[in-house]
Image (tube, helix red, strand yellow):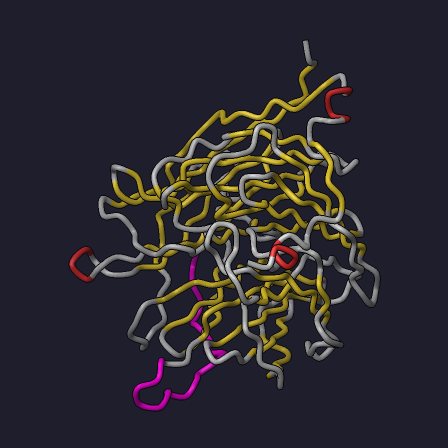
């Protein structure tokens, strides 16, 4: 293992319990309500697929405030794979029935990969075999006709079928931007206007060897993404080492220059917009969380050294899935779900005030069983909601956990 590459993310080391002990008050975060959004007696078998969520914007209908999209993969004997969509309110109650994503005239599993919220509709981007589609939904949950974005040619005999394997989307002032990567390393970039219509499409000449994630750079910043670039060797938990490379795009959605090293490694991370910065939080195994702030200007995203905040005592298990949220009260949240021996058994939280000095909290989301992918995080008036897809003793479940965080005075 090349430790220099795995732990290059550590710019400075500080204890999370240092200056925080001098504060008169500290956050108390606890789960106050859990609601089951959807369930099935058969466990789902798709590991690594995130729950997708976005707020309903100007077209909110009735009590519905958020849209959730997820997939439940099962054997044909148990009903096969199905992609679901649901609307929920701020009280975590489901509004209307759970819908099913479908692409007319196409056989095969619908695999939702990315989502974007527009003023009057929600865009969901999904793969079906070797094709890739944009599906739109109004505030009532009604689906419009799917539009094909990519139809990849069949692979030569004996070769794996080329298909879109990752996608990432982000909202912009004029609509949305989408990047989609195929198994062969090709990347396609798209722009959509505020009505959800495609306005531009670009195919990169570069091939990439890892998935990308668009960053929330705000209305005035450039389009930028992190590229997960694998490295040779073996990580501390047997995983493949990697670095996160910053890629800035021009108006044509092509890379401006060579990717830049950020100092973040292969561990799960979240990215949220905080003022004129992008805040990255990466959970470093059992050790704690590395936090970095990337200043955003009109033309570029600047790099800064992340700082590692140790958990005292160290967490148990390894970090597996992460999510983040910039809340209404100026506090951001970085959530991680870890595992031991393949079972997701822990969830830990970094409560990050405007000063940037986090307080780490253990097991604030009471998840049991095996989590299937990264949770979605939604804002609440007094904290946040984590939406988690997981298997437990009763089968598959999509649960929403309302976590309330309040400042209390240390006795």
Dominant SS of magenta comes to: loop
- Say which residue appears at 61% left-offset and 28% top-offset: 312
- Say which residue appears at 42% left-offset and 55% top-offset: 48
344 displayed left or right of 226:
left
- Say which residue appears at 70% left-offset and 56% top-offset: 263
111 displayed left or right of 192:
left
Which quadrant: the C terminus?
top right
Q: Position of residue 388 (x, y in %)?
A: 43, 43
> Depth check: 208 or 115 in front?
208
Residues in magenta, as a range: 140-160
Q: Does residue 145 appear in this view?
A: yes
Does the magenta portion include 241? Answer: no
Tell me if residue 71 comes above or below residue 393 in the rendering: below
Q: Name, please, the residue furthest toward the left.
A: 77
Q: Position of residue 226 (x, y in %)?
A: 64, 63
Tell me if residue 223 comes above or below residue 311 in the rendering: below
**Residue 4 picture quarter:** bottom right
- Say which residue appears at 65% left-offset and 47% top-offset: 281
Q: Name, please, the residue furthest toward the top.
A: 411
> Depth check: 313 or 51 in front?
313
- Total marks shown come to 0
Q: Does residue 38 appear in this view?
A: no
Tell me if residue 394 comes above or below residue 242 in the rendering: above
Q: Name, please, the residue furthest toward the bottom.
A: 156
């Amino acid at each position: 293992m090349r430790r220099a590459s795995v732990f290059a993310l550590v710019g400075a080391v500080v204890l999370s319990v240092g200056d925080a002990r001098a504060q008169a008050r500290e956050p108390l975060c606890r789960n106050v309500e859990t609601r089951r959004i959807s369930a099935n007696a058969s466990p789902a078998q798709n590991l690594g697929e995130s729950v997708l969520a976005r707020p309903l914007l100007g077209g909110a209908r009735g009590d519905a405030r958020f849209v959730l999209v997820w997939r439940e993969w099962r054997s044909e004997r148990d009903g096969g794979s199905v992609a679901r969509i649901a609307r929920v309110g701020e009280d975590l109650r489901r509004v209307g029935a759970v819908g099913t994503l479908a692409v007319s005239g196409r056989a095969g599993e619908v695999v939702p990969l990315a989502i974007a919220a527009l003023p009057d509709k929600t865009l969901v981007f999904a793969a079906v075999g070797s094709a890739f589609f944009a599906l739109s939904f109004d505030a009532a949950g009604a689906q419009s006709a799917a539009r094909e974005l990519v139809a990849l040619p069949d692979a030569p005999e004996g070769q794996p079928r080329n298909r879109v394997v990752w996608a990432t989307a982000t909202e912009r002032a004029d609509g949305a931007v989408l990047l989609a990567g195929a198994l062969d390393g090709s990347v396609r970039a798209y722009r959509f206007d505020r009505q959800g219509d495609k306005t531009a499409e670009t195919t990169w000449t570069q091939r990439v060897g890892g998935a990308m994630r668009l960053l929330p750079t705000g209305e005035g910043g450039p389009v930028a993404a992190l590229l997960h670039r694998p490295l040779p060797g073996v990580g501390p938990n047997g995983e493949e080492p990697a670095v996160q490379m910053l890629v800035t795009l021009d108006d044509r959605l092509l890379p401006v220059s060579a990717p830049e090293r950020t100092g973040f490694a292969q561990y799960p991370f979240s990215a949220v917009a905080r003022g004129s910065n992008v805040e990255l939080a990466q959970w470093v195994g059992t050790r704690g969380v590395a936090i970095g702030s990337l200043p955003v200007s009109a033309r570029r995203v600047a790099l800064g050294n992340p700082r590692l905040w140790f958990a005292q005592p160290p967490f148990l298990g390894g970090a597996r899935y992460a999510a983040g949220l910039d809340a209404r009260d100026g506090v951001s949240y970085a959530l991680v779900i870890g595992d031991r021996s393949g079972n997701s058994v822990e969830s830990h939280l970094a409560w990050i005030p405007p000063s940037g000095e986090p307080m780490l909290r253990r097991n604030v989301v009471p998840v049991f069983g095996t989590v299937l992918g990264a949770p979605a995080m939604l804002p609440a008036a007094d904290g946040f909601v984590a939406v988690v897809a997981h298997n437990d003793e009763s089968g598959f479940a999509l649960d929403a956990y309302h976590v309330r965080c309040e400042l209390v005075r240390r006795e």
